[in-house]
Image (cartoon, grey):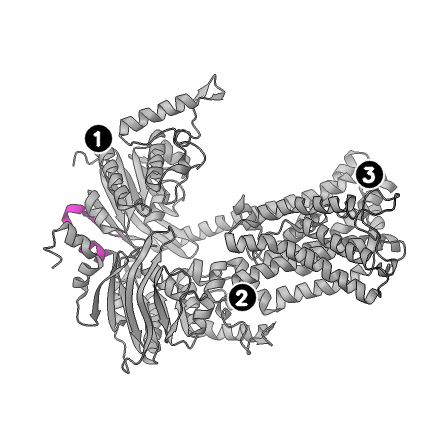
Amino acid sequence: MMRLLRSLLPGRRKLGFAYLFSLAISVALALLLGALMMRLTGYSPVEGYAALVKGAFGTRRALGNTLAKAVTLSMTGLAMAVAAQAGIFNVGGEGQLFLGGMAAAIVGSQLTGWPAAVAVPLAFVAAITAGGLYALLPGVLKVRLKVNEVITTIMLNSVAIYLCAYLANGPLRTADKGIAAGTNAIDPAYVFPRLIPLSNLTASAVYAAVLALLCWYVMKRSTIGYEMKLTGQNPRFARYMGMKTDRLILWSMAASGALCGIVGLFEVYGLHRRFIPSLSNEFYFDGMLVAMIMRYDPVGIVLMSVFFAMLKIGGTAMELGVGISSELILIVQSIIIFFMAAQSGLARIVRERRGRRAARRRIEGKNVPQGEATS
Amino acid sequence: MREQQSAVRFTRVSMQFSGVLANDNVTLDIHSGEVFALVGENGAGKSTLMNILYGLHTPTAGDVYVRGKRVERYSPAGAITMGVGMVHQHFMLVPSFTVAQNIVLSREPKRRGLLYDFKKAEETVHALVNEYGLSVDPGARVSQLGLGLQQRVEILKTLHRGADILILDEPTAVLTPQETDDLFAVIRRIVQEKGMTVILITHKLYEVMALSDRVGVMRGGRLVGLEETKNVNERMLASMMTGSEMPPGQFAREGSAGDTAVEVLGLQTLNDRGLPAVKGVSFSIRRGEILGVAGIEGNGQSELVEAIAGLRPLRGGEVRIRGQRINGLLPGEIRGLGLAHVPEDRRLTGASLQADVTDNLLAGRQREKRFAVGRIHRKRGAARQYAEKLFRAFDIRGAGVDAPAGSLSGGNLQKVVVAREFSFDAPVFLISQPTRGVDIGAARSIHQSIVDKRNAGAAVLLVSADLDEVFQLSDRIITMYEGRITGEFTAGSIEKAEIGYYMTGDRIARHHSGEEAL
């Protein structure tokens, strides 16, 4: 289990041409299998996929919804990638997201009547602090006591989600009887403007673009990213070379949690306008998948997020329009993931075969003139 | 010798891993009913050879025969069927299970063909324990047993599976002296009374002398010696293990030693298993001086170096580098005092195999002005150029600076580590096994670089399993045995043949009542 997880961590393999090639084949095969299933259930694949693409990009509203979905996926995916760069498997993003959303909602609903230019940054600070500190907890446990972060982060998800549910149903419950559960609404002045009317695409996308750029820069172009990468690949080497590996691990964990907290803020300030217990439907786990498929490459994560968002939004439209069950899209997604998981294994087998054959040739060639070679 | 039947036969076995020829054309016969010791330094290929026998690797070339029968498919399951059992250095037991449950694991006795018969399991193990005289309580939980008893459970497990050829990989590494004596008694009993064949992998020579009938010496993947134990002594084995094919070289030494740069006082530290590895070692090194440490591997040299580099906590004593006490400092802080370090293990410590060669060569300098704007923004072009320069200067052969370091052969990876560390203008160098696995030409140039550093006024601590290397380069030599310094010499005041006494320490004095040691 741990070996499997470790093989999923970054640095193992790069996002090279060969990988992208097999990714393209996987996607094509998955779509082909999806087409086959449509055929078998009596629908036209051409019609189905046309409805899917149209449903995702066909109208301004659809486009907005697809991009909004991509924003969530790429932010959570990048959160996963930032931690993974330093060798940490942060499975606790969901909890960090909830706490960030709750903290932002408290700020927005308690500090009403402030100028948005003050209150919104404060909400960001609250979300970043809540998510970051909550991620720091398993980080400290890992660094100080060598407690495996996979287990602690998974466990802490439930703690955060139920804590927030308690707050939203209990002490912080809105007085509004029309709301099933949730905090008070934030001041309407703080709500993010919509970039495309009637769609879910809000100013979150602008913040997300800035954050994605920052992530890419830190991971790919900064000395800190370099040190995080070496720490993730071989912590012993990084320490031996003089890097402060403990501190790097803590910072990347905090950054990962902060990004998740911000996604929580996006959901509150962009869409729901208050904290609700169903703030996220496992958004972080979807992002994790995207990040893992793209081997934690920031650019790759953003692009793949758009694709997965298309499947998600277009899938619903396809069901409504043509009648093909949107579960089919889940199957297509699963097949892509399945192929990509198999890909690493297959590539290894091929590589080992090839290496063994080459080595055998070398040795057998060498055994003959050995007397000369060793003289 | 009762019988001379062949238990195991290796014919022209070679094993190639990526870049490393771990076994090179090994032909070896192990007789039935003997204790055969296989000795060699780390990386000599002894574990690889035995892992082949146990079916963990398929040899790249050559064949293995067990009792005359050729091994067709290499797998542990196959090896067990042929009667080969192996006890690894790291035990493979389920801690929460009882002794009996562990021993019958995967062949549990069943009641009505379905239910686990715990009672039967304990009875079976009881019978086994009595048959072999290996006392251990079948009902005890493994997590509550000491390492010596856990090892006994491992041995019983292989016996339960019908092994009569037993491979023990460094069995005494984790044991106390008392547990070691018990293990030896057990081995003698199962060989003499049950006619088993035992293969002992070790680099502790007194164990070879105490226990084995015959001994094979491996070096650099090849079998370089095969003797009846009664015809050799520890000293002869030591020289077979540590000899090298390196041509003697002369290096021009200039200048005389200056101020003291490194002071080690009563240093104590533990090994990875928490046992004392260095038991109070003191020495000093002056600038412009190479201090060589000679010793059979596993006598505390590695731990000593790691403690000085800050990679292993000190348990006692102190270390000063250029007058500064380093106790409790991080490795990076110690480097800041002017230390560079070529570690003995290039794959685990000396490099990141997944990172490309550029990243490996740059490490430690990433925040320098010429490689980063404001310590943050990487100048990747400058880094690449710098790496290419070192790549050429050290004649590294490989797919180039953009290839992952893991794709380089062992010798070339070593050059990457050496190139990086020697590019630091440090007054103190810790150098461990600098030329292991490196071809002769490269080894010579590494040697020249070490002497150049010395001539330029650096203090060098050189640890090597290769005696010739220590003799060629050092101004002074200390010998280590069992975590202590057993001798100190200036270059030229002692012969290579003579230093074996000190490297095998008081053991010779003990086993031969002192006559030979003095």
Numbered disc 1: what chain? B
Q: Which residue is mark 2?
A: B402
Of the pair B469 and A153, the residue shown nearer to us: A153
Amino acid at pointer 2: Asp
Q: Quarter-wise, where is residue A34 in the image?
A: top right
Asked whether the viewer can see residue B80, the reply is yes
- Left or right of residue B487: residue B410: right
Residue that lies at the very extreme toward the left in this rendered image: B515
Amino acid at pointer 3: Ile
Q: Residue at x 33, y 25 (%)?
A: B126
Q: Give the residues in magenta.
A: B223-240
Q: Which residue is mark 1?
A: B193
Which mark is on residue A180? none
Q: Residue at x 23, y 40 (%)?
A: B35
Which mark is on residue A324? 3
Question: Quick one: SS at disc 1?
Answer: loop
Q: Are marks 2 and 1 in contact (CB under 8 Å)?
A: no
Mark 2 or mark 1, earlier in chain = 1
Q: Quarter-wise, where is residue B286 in the image?
A: bottom left
| Label 2 crowd bin: few (<14), some (14–19), many (20+), radius 10 Å | some
- Left or right of residue A164: residue B6: left
**Residue B450 colored in magenta in the image:** no
Q: Position of residue B308 (x, y in %)?
A: 37, 66
Give the foreground label among 3 and 1: 1
